[in-house]
Amino acid sequence: MGPATIFYLPSAEIDLSSRPFYLEQDCGVNRTNGVYLQNDFYFGVKKELKLGGLLDFYTKRGILVGPALKIDTQTEKNQISSEVKFGFIRDRASTERKGSDIKNKPIPSDRYFLEFAHRQHYDDRIDVIARSTLLSDSEVERDFRKTWYNRNQQPGSFVEVAYRGQNYIISTFGQFEPNAFYNTTQQMPEFRIAYLPTKLLDTKLVHNAHLGVVRLHNRNRDLYGATNSSRVDAYYGMSLLLEYNNFLTIKPIFGTRALAYGRNDDGETYGKGLIQGGIDIDLKFTGRSDYANETFGIDGLKHVAIPTIQYRVIPSGSGSSKVPKFHGECFNTEIPSIDLDDMRNVDDLQRQHMVRFGIKNSLYTQSGSYVPRKLMRLDVFQDMLFTRNYDSFRQVHQKRFPDTHLIAGIYPVSWFSFDVYGKVDPVNLHLRELKTTTSIRDADFWKLTFFTNYLKFDGVNSQKSTDQYGLSFTFNLSSQISISIETQYDAKIHKFSQQRFSFSSTLWNSWLIDVGITTRANAKREDRFQFDWHLKLLDF
């Protein structure tokens, strides 16, 4: 008859070739939490599975506890990486000390957070990515997991599944908001088919298209004009690619986009249609030199300059003015797209008639590999608007010449780099934004980084700006021991807003310990003085 199973015993497998235990620990003292000890730990139950939890102690807050797990597995066709962390604490602090959330509502005593992340790649065709954050209040991670909060101050929740065909992508994207204190447009979900740019038969015509169906929801009717709506979004575009001797590229562009809205709050159905016409012109100039410099490792120079002109016209869309504006104009520090296919503010899109001109510059030299080493870059872009619309986000009319965008970088040697991004008002020559990062390093001994961050924002009936400078210096006393100094200066309050002095060392080639002292000025929820240490078992 063969063997018969009577019962199973629990079992676990431990891979002795890797570390079976992982620990990340933070300890310190401050006025808000008192003496605290934070622990994130995992046990390697199987090679692809790690189980653990969170266990924190706060003398002024209580005990935070919760489970955690990590899954990392890879086969010939399937690769999965998932992580879940949950923490709960019954906060003993007073109502005044807990404060209020971003909606000015009192923070409850029962506080929790749940972080979920998943990434999967299957058979070179299917990708799955998901992330969700569930919070008891908007400040819980700021109080009990500051590093998480610094990375993402307003986390979003979404899931996307995409299938990649030969020249198309079929995807499902859902964006939801489990936290009632955030105003986020929820897509529940969006089904989309994208036909990638493809040559039409044997001609020089290239066409692309997309079709999307989505159910939209938001809690704020006054802000978006509706709380619920369904939307069908269809686009078809065509371009003609004309190339001349790798020197001149001319690409006429045409596109049309139709949107239909139904199942709205008022039960009505609305729609709008948009068309786009334009042309892209690119020139390419290449210059070469035999210049060599042994000190800077330069073996010949190659300069590539690409002047570009992009002209676009999008007449006013035909349709109802009652279209809900779930995706409208928003604050953006990057260069916005001018192609109808890529625009996300289609619900509130007005007439567009503009030209964008600019130049891209890159300087290269030969390197030891097949990839040339970039020494310098300088990109400049400027828009000119023939039609100036009313900006409902800032409540002002658009300028004829919006901000000039400048992107530059200098990398003469491997131990020095300088990057800058700036925006300038070309009429008044007022600086609107400036971000710079300068790094000097000696990989064996030290690293020095200096940054600036200036941003001027014209809001509704007000002007706000940030003006900050930062410096960090790390010096390696040995291969295992280093000291670091980080400081930030805020020009708005004329104070050093934060300084941190730390000492780091590896222990027995398995542990990393970091001990630091932090001081702050004008802190909102953080303390002005904090002592902490960070202990981490190197990953396995």
Image: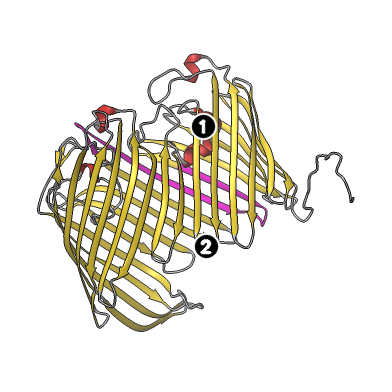
Mark 1, secondary structure of its residue = helix
Instruction: In the rendered structure, find residue 124 and report the number of the disc placed on it.
Output: 2
Residue 47, percent across and down? 72, 51
Q: Bin the neighbour count of mark 1 within 10 Å (Cα to Cα): few under 14, some 14-19, many 20 and up.
A: many
Question: Most extreme residue toward the front, as rendered?
Answer: 1
Question: Most extreme residue toward the left, as rendered?
Answer: 386
Q: Which residue is mark 1?
A: 141
Check disc 2 and give the amino acid type.
Answer: Asp
Q: Which residue is at 47% across, 26% downward?
A: 137
Residue 392 seen from this side: yes
Q: Which residue is at 33% across, 37% downward?
A: 216
Magenta segment boundaries in residue numbering: 458-487
Q: Bin the neighbour count of mark 2 within 10 Å (Cα to Cα): few under 14, some 14-19, many 20 and up.
A: few
Q: Nearer the viewer, residue 6 or 348?
A: 6
Check disc 1 and give the amino acid type.
Answer: Glu
Q: How far apart are the alpha carbons under marks 2 and 1?
A: 36 Å
- Above or below, 320 relative to 205: above
